[in-house]
Image: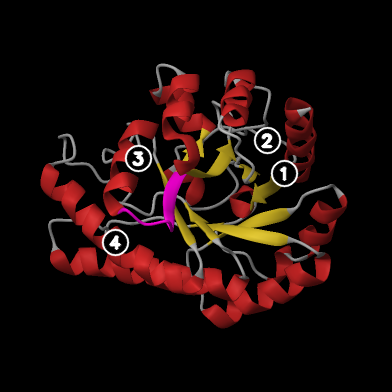
Amino acid sequence: MKIGINFLLWTTHVEEKHFHLFSILKKAGFDGVEIPLTMGNTKHYQKIKQVLDSEGLACTTTSNGSPDKNLISPNSTIRQAGLDHLKWAIDCNEALGSNILGGPIHSSPGVFTGMPASVKEQDWCIENLQIASSYAEQAQVTLCLEFLNRFECYLMNTVSQAKQIVDAVKSPFIGIHYDTHHAHIEESNLTTAIRAAGDSIKHVHFSESHRGMLGQGLVDWQTNVQGLKSINYDGWITIEAFTNKVPGLASALHITRPLIENELECALSGAQFIHALFK
């Protein structure tokens, strides 16, 4: 098992002013960091890799679709833009030396039709992910589809819905991104959901029910850990927590109250919490 921290705790775009955090996180026992991919070019991410390498940190990444870059849009131009974005994100992963790209890369959070996902929308998703996974294979990057709760997404809200898409794509370079926050809202039985997914789960976020500090909300941590142990999960456990201080992100996630007083304290206490859970 490897422990990481998603840099969305601090920013949507990692820049040089954030580099000082790398050494602190390494000394605190983190194995790596998760870099959000929202903008920039491969040269920028190659520079980040150099700094991470110097600190002995590995990394994963996360990204997402958007209204103008959406793999399941009825507009073919927007679907193509979504695929192009995904290929760009894979290139950035290669520049970073990351082999995990997670997040809601399958569609656009916050875009709804008022209806369940149609067969056509699912087919568009599968078709584009087949192309993307073939591209990802060349870079040895695994695409991990994060199911989101019903208030953020309508394509996939549960582990089983994510697995349906993953199974249809039929690529060793695609899997499920399991997030405890969304599972807490949507699943009826965490153990059943995790075991049914099995080795399709390729990436894990530990995120609290209110998205603040781990252990201070309602997520059933023991059941999540027992479930992951039962499938012999040995990949990344990445902390995902948010504040109301990051412009754009706070409004997108409707975080209006202060959930965290100190970001670094949140990260460090989260790492200690995870280590204690897995003992």
Q: Earlier in the sequence, mark 3 or mark 4?
A: 4
Question: Badge 3 is on which residue?
Answer: 162
Instruction: Say the numbered circle drawn on residue 130.
Output: 4
- Residue 52 in percent (x, y) is at 74, 67
Q: Nearer the viewer, residue 1 or 277?
A: 1
Question: Badge 1 is on which residue?
Answer: 263
Which residue type carries mark 4? Answer: Gln
Q: Secondary structure at mark 1?
A: helix
Q: Is residue 65 above or below residue 210?
A: below
- Which image quarter: residue 112? top left
Are there few (<14), some (14-19), or many (20+) residues within 10 Å of tag 2? some
- Residue 134 in percent (x, y) is at 36, 68
Q: Nearer the viewer, mark 1 or mark 3?
A: 3
Question: Badge 2 is on which residue?
Answer: 260
Q: Nearer the viewer, mark 2 or mark 4?
A: 4
Which residue type carries mark 3? Answer: Ala
Are there few (<14), some (14-19), or many (20+) residues within 10 Å of tag 1? some
> Which quadrant holds the C terminus?
top right
Tell me, yes or no, if residue 159 can be seen here: yes
